[in-house]
Amino acid sequence: MPLPGRDVAYPGGQLGERYKEFLKLDGLDPENLVHAQRYVVADVASWSGYLDYTLLGSYRKIMHLPAQLSWSTLRYTDPDIALAQSDEDKILGFDPPVIEESGRFMALQIQLQLGTAAYATMAIREITKMDTSSQIQAVLTQLSEDQKFKGGTGGEAPIEVEGEGEDAEMPVAEDDGEAVAEMVEA
């Protein structure tokens, strides 16, 4: 899938016409994406003088297949303890998290390697067929059973999400999962 620029070949037919239409809506000439406009770079030490304002374009894959895909279920009791070791933790020499075999709660851990311009959140969205926006994930986290045990406080106050689409307004109830059902239907 081409990203707009002078160094790409656009598809023919209706799709190519849609590309040109959107470029024109943004005030760009799809036949000439080389601009004579120049601007001065603030940090002259790292760049020499002026830079051209030109869209080069590139290509993105529509579909990525993950490499080294694996998954496992983990048991845990304390929702405040990390279930995975970050790259930073590994570099700093921190011990990996201890997983409790007899833990009260269960989590799914997915490990995969994706190529450039591919994102794990999008892969998870496609697998689960659920919204991955931060607002919805915050609501799901709050509604999860383990949050009743977070920090020994018995849970936190509900949060509200407003808007449309991925930002759909969703009432949140502390004692049941109806908000999750409403989110999936939206």
Image: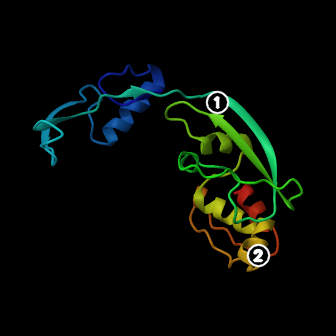
Sequence order check, earlier mark of 1 and 2? 1
Of badges 1 and 2, nearer the viewer stands 1
Q: Residue at x 37, y 35 (%)?
A: 21
Q: Is residue 109 left or right of residue 106?
A: left
Q: Quadrant of residue 151?
A: bottom right
Distance between mark 1 and mark 2 Cα atoms: 37 Å
Q: Which mark is residue 66?
A: 1
Q: Whole-percent x and y of residue 137?
A: 65, 59
Residue at 35% x, 28% y is: 57
| Residue 81 relative to residue 113: left or right | right
Which quadrant would the C terminus be assigned to in this image?
bottom right
Report the label total: 2
Q: Amino acid at mark 1?
A: Pro
Q: Which mark is residue 174?
A: 2
Check disc 2: other Cα within 10 Å, few if <14, some if 14-19, many if 20+: some
Expressed as whole percent of the image width and height from the top left, the position of residue 139 reads 68, 65
Q: Where is residue 140? Give x, y as percent.
A: 71, 62
Left or right: where 160 falls relative to 128: left
Q: Nearer the viewer, residue 159 or 81?
A: 81
Where on the picture, by quarter, is residue 58?
top left
Q: Secondary structure at mark 2?
A: loop
In the image, residue 127 sits, relative to residue 138, either above or below, namely above
Q: Residue at x 55, y 28 (%)?
A: 62
How packed is label 1: few (under 14 Cα within 10 Å), some, or many (20 or more)? some
Are discs 1 and 2 less than 8 Å apart at CB?
A: no
Q: Does 130 sit above or below residue 38?
A: below
Q: Which element carries disc 1, helix, strand or loop?
A: loop
Q: Position of residue 66 (x, y in %)?
A: 64, 30
Q: In the image, 29: left or right of 101?
A: left
Q: Amino acid at mark 2?
A: Glu
